[in-house]
Image (cartoon, helix red, strand yellow):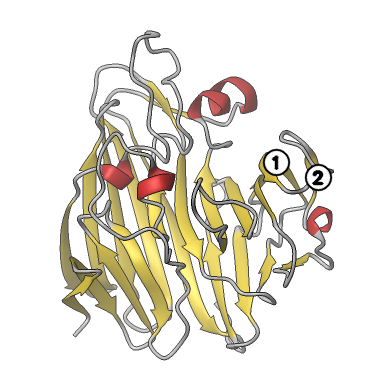
């Protein structure tokens, strides 16, 4: 059966499955994807052992109450931000955007191209409809995501979007960004030689070589970086211990940026043990705060009344002797 009802941490969930892959979504938790794996392979999505997966509460901190891992969507900002151009007394956009705590509607259906979980949510502080379709190919080990956002209001507004998958990495896991040569730092912890705003070479500035960053055994540092995804449009994670790799593929004209959050036991919210994980985030706009993307980086997009914007993303989960 290509899809079935299941549960995750006691919450209703939907599992999509083909001969190669399984992906699990929890609709009541911002349509979070909690699992992505080959049917006989390793789990690629990280899950917190310190924050319980539960239905989100609006007006709470994402990192303190909802940073449970998995795959979220961040729109129309990633970092907490005032709305550019709005009156000063207007409420700010919340950390990690509105979608993680929004109410989503969804349906699942089979078709010639596979099985699809289609879901949508509406904006609260800005007038928009956000749609995401997650499709498993009937034959190939690939998850295809299609996105569409529409301005349902009467005025234009600025926005950025970022996928927010947190990946389960181990010492020895490698990260390759074939078209990225330099990155700009948005946050840094535990690396005194680097500062926010620095532009540095990738991956050399973080101990990588030959175009490849290897997750280290030792050290306590964390950094959020942004780069232009470049012509290849590919991001590659490899687990040599399990002979698996995960490849994310975008069209750079649709999704021009990539955010990289490397957490080498260097950061956690107050009262938590520091995490060891990776957020690899194809994005439209940078950095994390919408106001800075508008004012300082010039990468924010604008959606006019009635206008729609769509884009896509593929995620291949492969045995390391295969190719996507």
- Front position in the image: 139 or 187: 187
- Asked if residue 120 is positioned above or below residue 23 in the image, the reply reads above
Q: Position of residue 186 (x, y in %)?
A: 65, 38
| Number of the label disc, if any, that sits on residue 200 | 2
Placement of the C terminus among the 4 image quadrants: bottom right
117, 207: nearer the viewer: 207
Please state if 161 lies on the left or on the right of 13 as rendered: right
Q: Residue at x 56, y 57 (%)?
A: 280
Q: Is residue 219 left or right of residue 292?
A: right
Upstream in sequence: badge 1 or badge 2: 1
The circle drawn on residue 155 is none
**Residue corresponding to mark 1:** 185
Image coords of residue 3 (percent x, y): 20, 77
C-beta proximity under 8 Å, tags 1 and 2: yes
Indicate whether 306 appears above or below 224.
above
For the residue labelled by badge 1, is the local secondary structure a helix, a strand or a loop? strand
* Quadrant position of residue 310: top left
The residues tagged by marks 1 and 2 sit, at their Cα atoms, a distance apart of 8 Å
Viewer-side residue, 311 vs 122: 122
Q: Position of residue 169 (x, y in %)?
A: 58, 71
**Placement of the N terminus among the 4 image quadrants:** bottom left
Residue at the spot 65% in from the left edge and 54% down from the top edge = 266
Mark 1 residue crowding within 10 angstroms, few (<14) / some (14–19) / many (20+): many
Q: Position of residue 223 (x, y in %)?
A: 67, 49
Residue drawn at (45%, 31%) of the image: 80
């Amino acid at each position: 059966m290509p899809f079935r009802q299941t549960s995750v941490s006691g919450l209703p969930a939907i599992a999509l499955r083909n001969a190669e892959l399984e992906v699990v979504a929890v609709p009541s938790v911002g349509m979070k994807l909690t699992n992505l794996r080959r049917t006989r392979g390793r789990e690629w999505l990280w899950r917190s052992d310190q924050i319980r997966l539960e239905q989100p509460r609006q007006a709470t901190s994402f990192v303190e109450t909802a940073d449970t891992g998995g795959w979220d969507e961040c729109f129309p900002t990633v970092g907490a931000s005032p709305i550019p151009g709005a009156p000063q007394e207007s409420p700010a956009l919340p950390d990690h955007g509105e979608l993680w705590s929004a109410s989503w509607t969804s349906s699942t259906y089979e078709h010639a191209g596979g099985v699809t979980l289609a879901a949508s949510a509406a904006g609260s502080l800005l007038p928009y409809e956000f749609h995401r379709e997650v499709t498993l190919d009937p034959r190939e080990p690939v998850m295809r995501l299609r996105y569409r956002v529409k301005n349902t209001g009467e005025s234009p507004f600025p926005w950025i979007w970022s996928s927010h998958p947190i990946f389960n990495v181990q010492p020895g896991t490698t990260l390759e960004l074939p078209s990225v040569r330099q990155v700009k730092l948005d946050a840094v912890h535990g690396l005194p030689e680097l500062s926010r705003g620095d532009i540095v070479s990738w991956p050399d500035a973080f101990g990588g070589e030959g175009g490849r960053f290897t997750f280290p055994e030792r050290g306590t540092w964390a950094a959020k970086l942004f780069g232009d995804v470049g012509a290849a449009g590919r991001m590659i994670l490899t687990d040599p211990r399990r002979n698996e790799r995960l490849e994310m593929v975008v069209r750079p004209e649709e999704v021009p940026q990539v955010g990289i959050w490397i957490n080498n036991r260097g950061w956690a919210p107050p009262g938590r043990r520091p995490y060891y994980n990776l957020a690899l985030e194809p994005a439209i706009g940078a950095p994390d705060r919408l106001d800075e993307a508008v004012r300082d980086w010039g990468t924010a997009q604008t959606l006019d009344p009635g206008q729609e914007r769509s884009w896509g993303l593929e995620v291949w989960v492969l045995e390391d002797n295969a190719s996507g």
